[in-house]
Image (tube, rainbow, N blue to C red):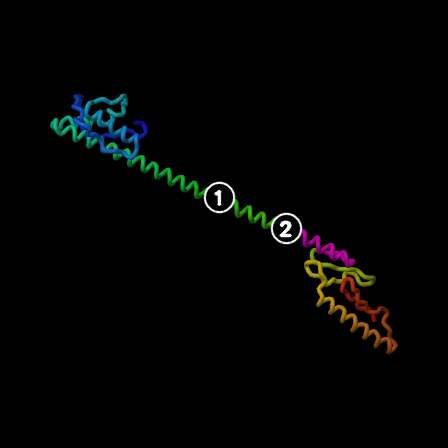
Amino acid sequence: MSACGVEGSSSDSSASTGTSPPSGDAGVIGADHPQCQALGEAVLEYLTTGDTGGEPEMERAYADTRASILTQPEEAREGVARARASDAVDACDTRLAEQAAAEAEDWAQAEAQEQADREVEERQRQRQEDADAAAEEERIQLETFRHACAAVGGEADGLSCTVDYPGWPDQYVPMDDSGNLIPEDVEVNRQDCEIGLEDAQISADEGYPWSELPQFHEESGVCTYGTP
């Protein structure tokens, strides 16, 4: 009884005399929940016999209903008692169904929240993995570039490589982010040196030799342009 509770009518008047139990096998309507079936049968027992089954709440809830039934003609009491007990079954089933629905909704919301939390955690984890992977890729790239720059006698600053030659410090090495010399830029520097040598030859022929001739550095792709 405690699972569903008991419900009665406050509009009925109380009485202390008993009634006859329902005849035959007729009883309350079938319930959706066992505890509601038990409640209906207990209510019917009380309404027809006055026996509370040791449940004080039964009398408090249904005393007025029982008193009202006792005012009915004797032949009508059985049907009225069954109807009131069936009402108790209906109310109990409804209450438990609503409770189950509320619990299911709470569970669904909790599950949805947990799923949302898992998705947030997964996105954060993925972002962290991506950041770690990007950082490692950058570290490897910088390390590779540094070694490539050092291999041509230069010094790296991030992804910039410069090399020092006597009288020509901090010469930019035409190197891409992977540490490879850029063929097009190397060729431009080579041609600049060739043009510089031609200019120096012309000046020498005119009696004005350069103090330092242009020099192309094959290992770095750098042209030091000389001094007229």
| Residue 156 part of the magenta-drawn span | yes
Q: Residue 82: in sight, yes or no?
A: yes
Residue at image location 71% in from the left, 56% down from the top: 145
Residue 27 lies, in percent from the top left, at 21, 30
Q: Quarter of the image holding residue 70?
A: top left
Please give the label number shown on residue 18: none
> Could you tell me which secondary element the residue under label 2 belongs to?
helix
Q: Is residue 6 above or below residue 120?
A: above
Three-letter amino acid code of the residue under disc 1:
Asp
Report whether 127 appears left or right of 100. Answer: right
Residue at image location 68% in from the left, 54% down from the top: 141
Q: Is residue 221 above or below residue 68?
A: below
> Could you tell me which secondary element the residue under label 1 belongs to?
helix
Residue 227 lies, in percent from the top left, at 83, 69
Q: Quadrant of the C terminus?
A: bottom right
Q: How busy is the neighbourhood of tag 2: few (under 14 within 10 Å), some, or many (20 plus)?
A: few
Q: Quadrant of the N terminus?
A: top left
Three-letter amino acid code of the residue under disc 2:
Ala
Taking depth in this image into account, of 77 and 158 the one nearest to the observer is 77
Q: How many marks?
A: 2
Toward the bottom, the furthest residue is 206
| Residue 147 part of the magenta-drawn span | yes
Q: Which residues are the magenta region?
A: 137-157
Q: How busy is the neighbourhood of tag 1: few (under 14 within 10 Å), some, or many (20 plus)?
A: few
Residue at image location 76% in from the left, 56% down from the top: 150
**Which residue bears the numbered disc 2?**
135
**Which residue bears the numbered disc 1?**
117
Report whether 192 appears left or right of 125. Answer: right
Q: Main secondary structure of the magenta part?
A: helix
Q: Is residue 227 above or below residue 156?
A: below
